Image (cartoon, rainbow, N blue to C red):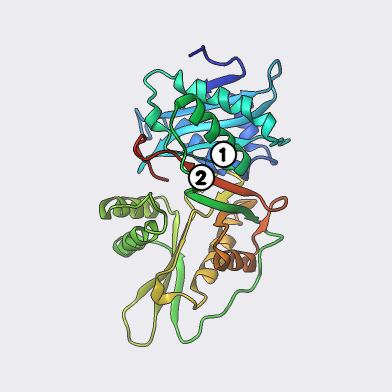
Amino acid sequence: MPGLNSSVRRFDRTNIPEDVWGALRDRDNAARANVILPHAEKVSSHQEFLSGSEQLWLVYSEPATSDIRFILSCTEGPLGKYPIFIIPVAPIQLASELLQGPMEAFCEALLNEADFRRQRVFSVFSVEPVSRAFASAWEKIAEIKCINKPYYDAFFSACTPGTLVRNGPQPVDEVIELRLAVPQDADKISILCENFSTTSDPFILSSEQADKEARLMIENEQVWVYEIKEGDGETDIASIVAATRQSHTVAAITKVYTPEKWQRKGCARRLVLRVCRELLKTHEQVVLYVGANNSGAQKLYDRVGFQATSGPERWLEIGFDRAEVELGHW
């Protein structure tokens, strides 16, 4: 394998340079960078956080220039290793013939990392053409086949103060509270997290993992609940919304789940609307990914005020042969 491609630079949590921070935080890139930037900021500013864990970023610049075109992260969080995330940097050019070189350079750079194992790359998540180009390059260079059906096929959209719907549906015959979760909610949220994960094959959580996720989100004030009581019944959590990735200007809704008992009552829409109102007090945008085949969720988010940032933008998570890789979680 040749040495590190001269168009690719590598950084760890101690030495991300200003031009890379600038590209991630640039107004034209910040929304897409939600999959990379918040985690990079946290591990870089808190060296003790996940000490000793894998935190690697690769940056591809145009040959003979300093113009950053793509940023790749190969990192891990409290629940495990993340997919390979790749964000294109504006101005974006996604023609397939322009992607092969950068993606092959990334693959070679990863494989040249000391102690890097091919099994680490269990999936890649990016804008559709980038995901497909990286998957093709990884198949060729690492000799691990990709899985034909994407793990996740989603549209990317954003909500701003200008698009946010001002009035949501009103509850009927319910006693409710829409609020940040507290430690006393942990057991119920844990069950909901575990149930939610069953819709995200193959990233299914054990009860222990779901409990850890719930308690982390509560501790970090990243999950809201729709608390409900009908008549003389017991209080229940009808819906949860999590926003686990937040940078200075952008917050990402990363989990919305309503158990079957409370579906089709407007609970999720009311809670998403409330969470967006809260997040937009301190952020310029709230972003999310919604399944391309999930028309119900698409309608819900449309009615809250989410819109495509610049026309429909499709993102894919493409997985690799499970017999050859070690799954992580995100």
Residue in front for this viewpoint, 64 or 140: 140
Residue at position x 40%, y 70% in the image: 259
Is 234 located above or below residue 154 in the figure? below
Disc 2 marks a residue whose amino acid type is: Glu
Quarter assignment of residue 258: bottom left
User: Of helix, strand and loop, which one carries label 1?
Assistant: helix
> Within 10 Å of the Cα at label 1, are there few (<14), some (14-19), or many (20+) other Cα atoms?
many
Q: Can I make out residue 316 in this image?
A: yes
The dot on residue 317 is 2
> Within 10 Å of the Cα at label 2, are there few (<14), some (14-19), or many (20+) other Cα atoms?
many
Cα distance between the residues tagged 2 and 1:
7 Å
Q: Position of residue 75 (x, y in %)?
A: 44, 34
Quarter assignment of residue 37: top right
Which circle's residue, 2 or 1, is located before the other in the chain?
1
Is 230 displayed left or right of 87 in the figure? left
Residue at position x 64%, y 60% in the image: 306
Q: Position of residue 35 (x, y in %)?
A: 53, 42
Disc 1 marks a residue whose amino acid type is: Ser
The dot on residue 68 is none
Q: Can I make out residue 45 in this image?
A: no
Quarter assignment of residue 323: top left
Is 105 located above or below residue 144 in the figure? above
User: Of helix, strand and loop, which one carries label 2?
Assistant: strand
Mark 2–mark 1 CB contact (< 8 Å): yes
Q: Position of residue 149 (x, y in %)?
A: 49, 48
Q: Residue furthest left?
A: 208
Report which residue position mark 1 lands on. Answer: 131
Q: Position of residue 231 (x, y in %)?
A: 37, 87
Is 311 displayed left or right of 200 in the figure? right
Residue at position x 54%, y 63% in the image: 294
Is 124 located above or below residue 310 in the figure? above
